[in-house]
């Protein structure tokens, strides 16, 4: 299972990007894809052109929920990785991926590499 991070989805939908090519390859290989409800919320905060929203809704009709056990892991990630201002949403996205044993496709690899010790895997180009 591969989960998309907000920035990856945005870049993939803008066309003629590395992320668009990666997403096309994932779709062609029929790799199971999803997005966490946290990343979905970030995406919806936009601005999002209507045609991008329609396409994203087709790709992700049921974003993975954020559960109470994810909150525990996200807090551990946050507290153990330096309590960096503005990083709580990344911790929440990572927690959902860890629970679902999913690989995260992100354009901000450096922001998520610190979570590898907790089992987060990242999609590499």
Image (cartoon, rainbow, N blue to C red):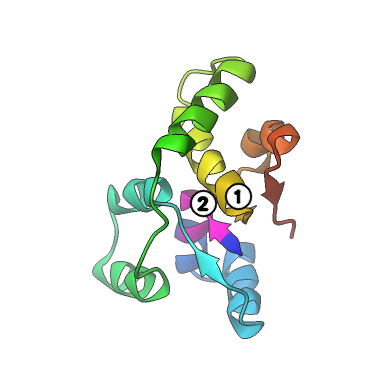
* Relative to 114, residue 3 above or below: below
Residue 19: percent from left, percent from top: 60, 63
Residue 15: percent from left, percent from top: 50, 70
What residue does disc 1 label? 107
Judge the density around disc 2: few (<14), some (14-19), many (≥20) Cα neighbours within 10 Å: many
The C terminus, quarter of image? bottom right
Tell me the SS state at disc 1: loop
Left/right of residue 79 with respect to residue 86 in the rendered view: right
Q: Residue furthest left?
A: 50
Residue segment shown in magenta: 3-9
- Of circles 1 and 2, the one toward us is 2
Count of labels shown?
2
Tell me the SS state at disc 2: loop
Q: Earlier in the sequence, mark 1 or mark 2?
A: 2
- Assess whether mark 2 and mark 1 are in contact (beta carbons under 8 angstroms): yes
In three-dimensional space, the C-alpha distance between marks 1 and 2, rounded to whole angstroms, equals: 8 Å
Residue 10: percent from left, percent from top: 45, 58
Q: Which mark is residue 5?
A: 2
Q: Is residue 8 magenta?
A: yes
Residue 77: percent from left, percent from top: 58, 26
* Relative to 13, residue 109 above or below: above
Left/right of residue 49 with respect to residue 125 in the rendered view: left
Which residue: 63% across, 53% down? 101
Judge the density around disc 1: few (<14), some (14-19), many (≥20) Cα neighbours within 10 Å: many
The N terminus, quarter of image? bottom right
Which residue: 33% across, 70% down? 57
Quarter of the view holding residue 82: top right
């Amino acid at each position: 299972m591969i989960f998309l991070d907000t920035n990856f989805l945005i870049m993939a939908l803008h066309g003629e990007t590395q992320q668009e090519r990666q997403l096309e390859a994932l779709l062609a290989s029929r790799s199971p894809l999803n997005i966490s409800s946290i990343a979905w919320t970030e995406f919806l905060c936009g601005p999002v052109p209507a045609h991008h929203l329609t396409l994203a809704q087709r790709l992700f009709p049921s974003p993975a929920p954020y559960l109470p056990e994810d909150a525990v892991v996200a807090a551990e990630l946050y507290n153990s990785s330096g309590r960096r201002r503005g990083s709580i949403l990344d911790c929440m996205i990572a927690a959902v991926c860890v629970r679902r044993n999913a690989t995260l496709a992100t354009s901000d690899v450096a922001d998520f590499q610190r979570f590898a010790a907790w089992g987060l895997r990242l999609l590499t180009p």
